[in-house]
Amino acid sequence: MSQVTNEVRPLSSAPIILAAQPAPKPYEPSSSTKVPPPQIQSSSSSSTKPIDRSSKAHLPPTLKLAAEFRRLAPNLTETYVAYGATESLAKECARQADYTIPQRHEPDVEIPLTANDEHLGIGSGWWYEETSLLPTFNTWAQITFLHMYLLIARFRTFPSPHPQTWHQHLLDHFSFGAEERM
């Protein structure tokens, strides 16, 4: 095992060696951290049968065709899967800081402004109530992008070349949402 020493040099004296510390080990789960899967207890008198998800018998014909196409050509269908999934994810990210401006649909009503001349809306939730952030477009965009950043970090763990596709679709959905709010 290698030893790591920390050396501190004062300005005008010999080096001071701090206590040697072992190099950090990579994480290795022990046998005590492994949890067995839960056991499903079934009674012999039960009339319900478990669904066999391995067969495509329970799917309608169009979904059977789509599943087979995805199996045969996964690289051709990945962009469509990513588009649909990232649409839901982007909406969830945007929902975290959702706000409204009720006056925007009324033609003769003036929309209240902040000191920075941003339209001030009405928002609820932790970001607005606990942190006292103002419900503006800028706040919405920053909070939404913060949540998206967490997703993008997870996308980077996908096998190549999928992260770029998922990242691009998530950014596209953010842009669509931003355009709707402007």
Image: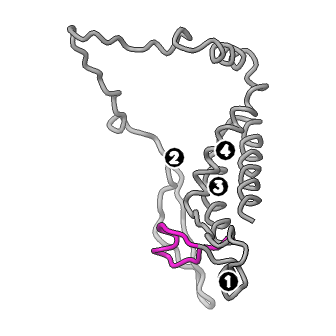
Question: Between marks 3 and 2, how big is the CA–CA gap?
Answer: 29 Å
Compared across the picture, whether 75 is left or right of 84 comes to right
Q: Nearer the viewer, mark 4 or mark 2?
A: 4
The residue drawn where x is 25% and y is 19% is: 41
Q: Height in image: 87 above or below 101?
A: above
Q: Which residue is mark 1?
A: 113
Left or right: 162 as drawn, with respect to 25: right
Tell me which segment is drawn in magenta.
122-137
Q: Earlier in the sequence, mark 3 or mark 2?
A: 2
Mark 2–mark 1 Cα distance, whole angstroms, equals: 53 Å
Reply above or below: 84 against 120.
above
Mark 1 neighbour class, 10 Å CA radius: few under 14, some 14 to 19, many 20 or more:
few
Instruction: Specify the amino acid type for callout 1.
Output: Leu
Q: Which of the numbered marks, if any, corresponds to residue 26?
A: 2
Q: Nearer the viewer, residue 143 or 16?
A: 143
The residue that mark 4 highlights is 87
Disc with the residue nearer the chain's start (4 vs 3): 4
Residue 148 badge = 3
Q: Secondary structure at mark 2?
A: loop
Find residue 102 and report its image quarter: bottom right
Q: Is residue 123 above or below residue 163?
A: below
Amino acid under disc 4: Glu
Going by the numbered disc 3, the residue's amino acid type is Met
For mark 2, does the 10 Å Cα neighbourhood hold few (<14), some (14 to 19), or many (20 or more) residues? few
Q: Earlier in the sequence, mark 2 or mark 1?
A: 2
Indicate whether residue 135 is drawn in magenta.
yes
Q: Nearer the viewer, mark 4 or mark 3?
A: 4
Residue 103: image x %, image y %?
A: 64, 73
What is the C-alpha distance between the residues marked 4 and 2? 36 Å
